[in-house]
Image (spheres, helix red, strand yellow):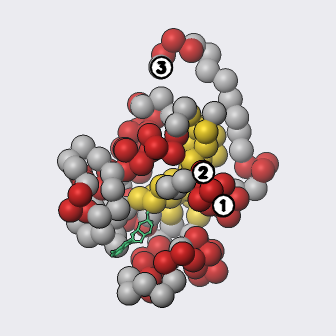
């Protein structure tokens, strides 16, 4: 099964919508296999967004990511990376349809509320940055007919 990484950015806790957003992933049938609340260090935020270093939005993006605790999640499922990207919606807010997380909640692209891995390589890198192997808790479905 494919794994993907999701980070609910500081605005999620501030707006009290963490449960609502996690529910969107769960009701689709994705499995939560690792989850934690944490405040990023600057080093970690810069490592996470290394590919954007030098872009005009980079500094403010890092500042926003450091402005409060985030929720880091690893989700597992068939085609989890693509499925989660459909649920979050595109990065560019003008393209994010209503019904997606960004389409429903984000007012600016930089403050787009949620991060989700965009490829197997970034999922692997991001999961390793946020989680140690002992922080994973794989589990089996009691009833596989649910999804
Ligand atoms: P995220 O999925 O966390 O990955 C990179 C982040 O950079 C993205 O969400 C946005 O928060 C931000 N970002 C990407 N492109 C732009 C842009 N054109 N203007 C402002 N912020 C951006």
Mark 3 vs mark 1, CA separation in Å: 29 Å
Q: Is residue 30 visible?
A: yes
SS type, badge 1: helix
**Residue 120 image label:** 2
User: Percent from the top left, x then y, of residue 42?
Assistant: 59, 81
Mark 2 vs mark 1, CA separation in Å: 9 Å
Q: Earlier in the sequence, mark 2 or mark 1?
A: 2
Q: For the residue carrying disc 2, how many other residues have a C-alpha within 10 Å: few (<14), some (14-19), or many (20+)?
A: some
SS type, badge 3: loop
Of labels 2 and 3, the one closer to you: 2
The residue identified by callout 3 is 147
The residue identified by callout 1 is 125
Res. 47 image quadrant: bottom right
Mark 2 vs mark 3, CA separation in Å: 24 Å
**Residue at position x 44%, y 40% in the image:** 83
**Residue at the outermost right position:** 134
Asked if labels 1 and 3 touch by Cβ distance under 8 angstroms, the answer is no
Of labels 2 and 1, the one closer to you: 2
**Residue 82 image label:** none
User: Percent from the top left, x then y, of residue 32?
Assistant: 57, 39
- The answer to whether 40 appears left or right of 68 in the picture is right
Q: For the residue carrying disc 3, how many other residues have a C-alpha within 10 Å: few (<14), some (14-19), or many (20+)?
A: few
- The answer to whether 77 appears left or right of 94 in the picture is right
In the image, residue 144 above or below residue 87: above
């Amino acid at each position: 099964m494919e794994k993907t990484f999701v980070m609910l950015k500081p605005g999620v806790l501030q707006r009290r919508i963490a449960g609502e957003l996690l529910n969107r992933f769960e009701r689709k049938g994705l499995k939560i296999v690792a989850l934690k609340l944490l405040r990023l260090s600057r080093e970690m935020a810069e490592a996470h967004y290394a590919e954007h270093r030098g872009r005009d939005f980079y500094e403010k993006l890092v500042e926003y990511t450091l402005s409060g605790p985030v929720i880091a999640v690893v989700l597992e499922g068939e085609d989890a990376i693509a499925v989660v990207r459909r649920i979050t919606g595109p990065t560019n807010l003008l393209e994010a349809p209503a019904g997606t997380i960004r389409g429903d909640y984000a007012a600016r692209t930089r403050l787009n509320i949620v991060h989700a891995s965009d490829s197997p390589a970034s999922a692997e890198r991001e999961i390793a940055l946020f989680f140690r192997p002992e922080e994973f808790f794989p589990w089996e479905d009691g009833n596989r007919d649910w999804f």
